[in-house]
Image: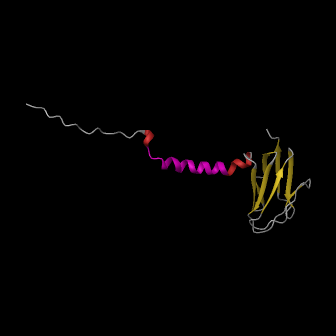
Amino acid sequence: MRACITPRPIARRESASRSPQPRRSLVALPTLLLWLATAPAALAAGNAATVEIQNFTFTPAELTVKAGTTVTWVNHDDIPHLVAATDKSFRSPPLDTDEQFSFTFEKPGKLPYFCALHPRMTGTIVVTKRK
């Protein structure tokens, strides 16, 4: 009598490392977007940073950058705004909707600014030394 051995297919188990990635991405994406939205408020990483003007507010209200960084204010309101330093070191022209103004900060220090058309709108740029 001859034994006939038929190989059975080996059942593969799905390992945890092979689980579908889209679910992880869906969780990671909002976290990444939140980080990207708030990171500039803490410290501008490169040589550029942005301050958004919306609802009569500068966002972030305080921005820390390294000397040599160019900060750009972008007006998203439907009315004009005019960005001006309290020490008169910079002053934008009136910025209409979606217009922008940029200024490069070279000296370390704390520079308060405001909207010359709406003086209750205030913000601060903190400039640190280059490393």
Residue 65 highlighted magenta (yes or no): no
Q: Name the one closer to the observer, 114 or 74.
A: 74
Residue 24 highlighted magenta (yes or no): yes
Horizontal arrangement in the rendering, residue 124 relative to residue 2 (left or right): right
Q: Residue furthest top?
A: 1
Q: Name the one closer to the observer, 55 or 67.
A: 67
Point out residue 122 in the picture as x, y percentages from the top left corner. Answer: 83, 56
The prevailing secondary structure element of the residues shown in magenta is: helix
Q: Residue at x 66, y 50 (%)?
A: 36
Q: Residue at x 74, y 45 (%)?
A: 42
Horizontal arrangement in the rendering, residue 36 relative to residue 6 (left or right): right
Which quarter shows the N terminus?
A: top left
Horizontal arrangement in the rendering, residue 119 relative to residue 99 (left or right): right
Task: Check the image and report above or below for 34 versus 2.
Answer: below
Name the image quarter holding residue 120: bottom right
Task: Check the image and report above or below for 55 versus 124.
Answer: below
Q: Which residues are magenta?
A: 19-36
Which quarter shows the C terminus?
A: top right
Q: Residue furthest left?
A: 1
Q: How is the image coloured?
A: secondary structure
Point out residue 66 in the picture as x, y percentages from the top left corner. Answer: 79, 44
Horizontal arrangement in the rendering, residue 18 relative to residue 49 (left or right): left
Total of numbered circles in the picture? Answer: 0
Q: Name the one closer to the observer, 127 or 76.
A: 127
Point out residue 116 in the picture as x, y percentages from the top left corner. Answer: 87, 62
Q: Residue furthest right?
A: 87
